[in-house]
Amino acid sequence: MKKIITMLLSAVLLLALTAPALAADGAPTEKEEVLYGILGLDGSVKSLYAVNIFNTGDVTDYGDYSRVENLTNSDPITQSGDEITIRSSAGRLYYQGTLKNLKLPWDIAVTYTLDGRQVPASQLAGASGALAIRIRVTQDPDVDSLFFDNYALQIALSLDTERCTDIVADGATVADAGTDKQLSYIVLPGKGADLTVCANIRNFAMDAMTFNGVKLALNMDIDDTQFNAKIDKLTGSIASLDSGAGDLLDGASRLKDGMSQYLSSLSTYKNGIGSLKDGASKLASGLSALEEGFGALTAQNDSLNTGAQSVEQAAFDAANAQLAGAGLPTLTPDNYADILSGSADLAAVKTQLDGIVAFAKGVGAYTAGVSKLQSGVSDLSGGASQLSSSLSQVASGAQGLYDGAAGLNSGIKSLKEGLAEYKSGTGKLHDGTADMGSEVSDQISALLSEISGGTEVRSFVSAKDTQVTSVQFVLKTDAVEAPEKQSAPCTQEPAAATFWDRLLALFGV
């Protein structure tokens, strides 16, 4: 773990810029800031240091520090209020300032639950049981929101698998390092976090947790050409769907109009059949008058036969029109019974046509009876009775045909209304997706912007430091150390501390 932290701090220092930037009198010198924080195991800030990195030894800087220390050499630092000046021949200079204000952009709270009971961190060393570590990260409203909104926070903790088993860390990136499980989380700019790590522990100890805040830079060049092409295809299909729905609605409207006309014709036909039936009844009662007018009636036989054939033809035309598209052959008086027999769905149509055929036959019988009327009024009376009976069947069939057509007309009306609602829906869908391609591109751009944060760099230490090129946060908690036996004190004289020793000592490394 110490090697990892050493490498991390070395990398932070090696990332400093190499271009020199000398400051005029009173003007801040260009620099980089690295904020180092020591946190308690509960996430509270115990101490906060700023390591300021310059590419020149002549420095003017600002910061509200309780203490400053030159980490490069022994050249003195002049501190006047919040102004710090250093005059040195060093080509690259580092100095550390201990900040008076312990506020961070992130409010970090860490709590521990052992066997279902919240316990202070001080009771964790050497403990055993079921442990839950909860890490909550929120924005500190008292700190410049630029850092919370534009910096990502990397959270890392390491658990020794010889002390911790059954580790559950939802949302973490898990890596094995020897016997340790290293758990890492990324909190995106502008976002908080509520994380929980659970494990069964025995003789518990844990290395320090680290929280590293960096300005997230994502070099993402998304080629959305193919994606937009698919969206354009989708929106084109929706437009075609809407157009097709319009055509379908127009067809349904024409069908409804045609069916209304057909129903009106059927009504006329039905009324005519009823009138014919009434006339046949009167015919039976007027046999005596028929006898007297036999000569005139005989002259009408051809017209009556022609009318009956027309009625029969009209009925079959209507039936063929009604069954168009059903895959049946054209119905005729000779074949309709064979074609329609055995189908319950077509029984009504057959009944109607039976009546029509019967009517036509009745008319034929009637005219034949008229022809035979010369042989006697009794034969004519029988033919009239047969005609009356046949017309009753025809009238009944006409009524059934009309009722069926009326039901079909009602269904077509409902179909048209449903298609109108469908067309309204496809129209709204078309309108709502017309600009979907550009909206998706805008959403992708907005999402990437939200993830990557802004481009502004601002000093965390002082608003007067206007020449800051980068700011980083390196935070670590105390470690949970298992109790160890006391060893004899070492009497060897310590070696003189180097720059690296002093810097690493901030983190107990």
Image (cartoon, rainbow, N blue to C red):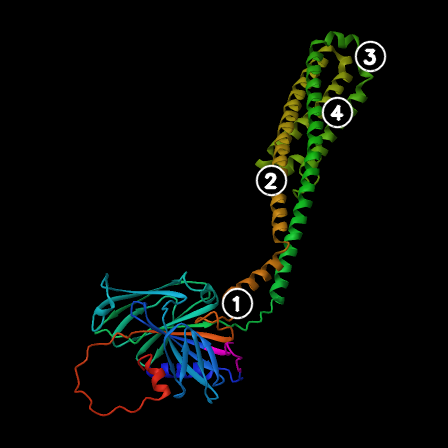
Badge 1 crowding class, 10 Å Cα cut-off, few under 14, some 14 to 19, many 20 or more, is: some
Q: CA distance from mark 3 to mark 4?
A: 21 Å
CA gap, disc 1 and disc 4: 91 Å
Can see residue 248?
Answer: yes
**Circle 3: is it few (<14), some (14-19), or many (20+) Cα within 10 Å?**
few
Tell me if residue 49 comes above or below residue 331 in the rendering.
Answer: below
Q: What distance separates the C-alpha of mark 2 from that of mark 3?
A: 60 Å
The residue to which callout 4 is attached is: 308
Q: Position of residue 187 (x, y in %)?
A: 42, 67
**Residue shown at 64% from the left, 59% from the top:** 233
Task: Name the residue tied to disc 1.
Answer: 454
In the rendered image, which quarter contains the C terminus? bottom left
Label of residue 295 in the image: 3
Q: In front here: 488 or 4?
A: 488
User: Which mark is in front, 1 or 2?
Assistant: 1
Tag 4 secondary structure: helix
Secondary structure beneath label 1: loop
* Label of residue 418 in the image: 2
Tell me the SS state at disc 2.
Answer: helix
**Left or right of residue 465, residue 439 in this image:** right
